Structure formats: C-alpha cells, structure tokens
C-alpha cells in the first residue's frame, strides 16, 4: 500500500511538472505566484543577505559538487560500495543531464529584471534545486541506511531538507530563478531520485 501511494505521488508530481512546463514554455514572464513572490523577496534584500545567499547557492553548484563528489566516489570505490557508487553517479551526472535536456525543451528565460548575480542558460527547471535535491537526498539515504537510531535518522533528514530548501531559496533571492523554476526543480528531482534508487535496488 505504501509503495502504491509513493508511485501515485510521483505521478501527480510529473503531471504538475508537465502542466507548469506547458504554461511557461518559451515564456519570459512569471506565472501564478512568481511575480508576487519575487517582488516581495526583492523588496527586502540586503547586502548581508546577498552575501549569505551567494555562499549558500555555492553548495548547489558544480564547483562544489565536483570536488566533493570525487572524494566520496573514491571513498566508496575503496570500500567496494557498489550501490553507493552507482547512486552517486546517477544522482549527479544523471540529474545534470536530465536538467539540461528539460531546460532545452522548455526554453524559459531567466527573470533578468531581478538579477543580483550573473547567470547564463535557461531557467526551467532550476538546476541548483534539482541537482541539490538528488545529490543531498542520495547522500542522506546512504547514511541513514547504516544508522539504526530513529532520532539520528530524523535529524539527518531534517538537515537534508533545510539545506535543499535554502539552496532553492537562494536562487530566488539572488533573482536568477522564478519560484516555479525552483519548485518544479524540487518536484522532478524528487521523482528522479525515487526512480533511480528503485532501479539500483532492483539491479542489485
């Protein structure tokens, strides 16, 4: 029953993603709540906030994932953790690849009016949001599998959620993504994470 509910939730997320994707395809403007949220947040930005968000957004960038990913990759190979190695590859390279494909399908322009930092490429879905969710969730999944105490597991998952949320929020705060880009990055990242974890379990 639990498995069916999870599958149903994934299907719902995919439907929502496709609906939003059709709404914003090749669109330069915000939709739904995009403009309201952007105007509210950017009416309260500060120089201190910008500096903090720059550091947080770095935690979701390729410049952070590449060295950290290589270190984790080497450690997993050394410990002969085949499942962990495969999950790491899928969570990073696979997520980046899928995100690039989706961006070039939907062709959404970034919210240039709100830019506080320079950022190239298309906007939908947010790569930082999507890849951060897949990477950090995979790492948390692997860690919690080796821990028996529920309290420790709960703390790790809570930290995981906070990190992912802050990275997504930083993209909106810095004006390089519409809120819908970030939310749909989370949505499709969650679906992708579930699928590749299930596939690796089946293969194993």
Image: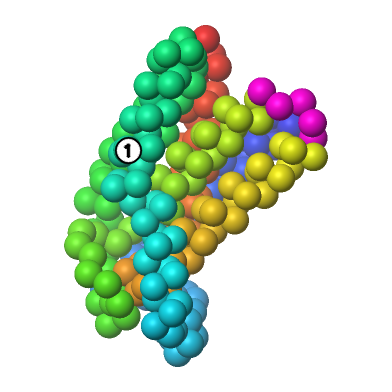
In this rendering, is residue 158 above or below 152? below
The percent coordinates of residue 126 (x first, y second) are 37, 56
Q: Is residue 8 left or right of residue 190?
A: right
Which residue is depicted at the point 77% across and 26% down? Answer: 148
The percent coordinates of residue 60 (x first, y second) are 39, 52
Which residue is depicted at the point 44% across and 70% down? Answer: 52
Which residue is at the far left? 120
The percent coordinates of residue 183 (x first, y second) are 49, 59
Which residue is at the far bottom? 43
Q: Which residues are magenta?
A: 146-150
Residue 97, quarter of picture: top left
In this rendering, is residue 174 above or below 122? below
Specify whether residue 194 is in view. Answer: yes
Residue 142 among magenta residues: no
The percent coordinates of residue 11 (x first, y second) are 55, 41
Q: Which residue is labeled 1 in the image?
A: 67
Which residue is depicted at the point 66% across and 43% down? Answer: 157
SS state under label 1: helix
- Pick whichever, 98 or 23, lies toward us: 98
In this rendering, is residue 4 above or below 107? above
């Amino acid at each position: 029953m639990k498995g069916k509910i999870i599958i149903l939730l994934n299907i719902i997320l995919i439907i929502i993603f496709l609906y939003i994707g059709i709404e914003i395809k090749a669109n330069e403007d915000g939709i739904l709540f995009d403009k309201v949220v952007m105007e509210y947040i950017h009416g309260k930005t500060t120089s201190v906030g910008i500096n903090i968000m720059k550091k947080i957004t770095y935690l979701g960038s390729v410049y952070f994932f590449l060295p950290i990913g290589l270190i984790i990759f080497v450690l997993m190979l050394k410990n002969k953790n085949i499942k962990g190695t495969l999950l790491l590859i899928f969570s990073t390279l696979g997520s980046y690849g899928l995100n690039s494909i989706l961006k070039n399908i939907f062709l959404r322009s970034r919210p240039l009016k709100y830019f506080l930092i320079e950022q190239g490429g298309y906007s939908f879905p947010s790569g930082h949001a999507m890849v951060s969710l897949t990477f950090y969730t995979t790492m948390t999944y692997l860690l919690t599998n080796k821990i028996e105490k529920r309290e420790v597991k709960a703390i790790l998952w809570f930290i995981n959620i906070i990190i992912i949320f802050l990275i997504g929020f930083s993209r909106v705060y810095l004006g390089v993504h519409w809120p819908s880009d970030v939310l749909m990055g989370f949505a499709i990242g969650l679906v992708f994470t579930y699928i590749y974890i299930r596939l690796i379990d089946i293969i194993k």
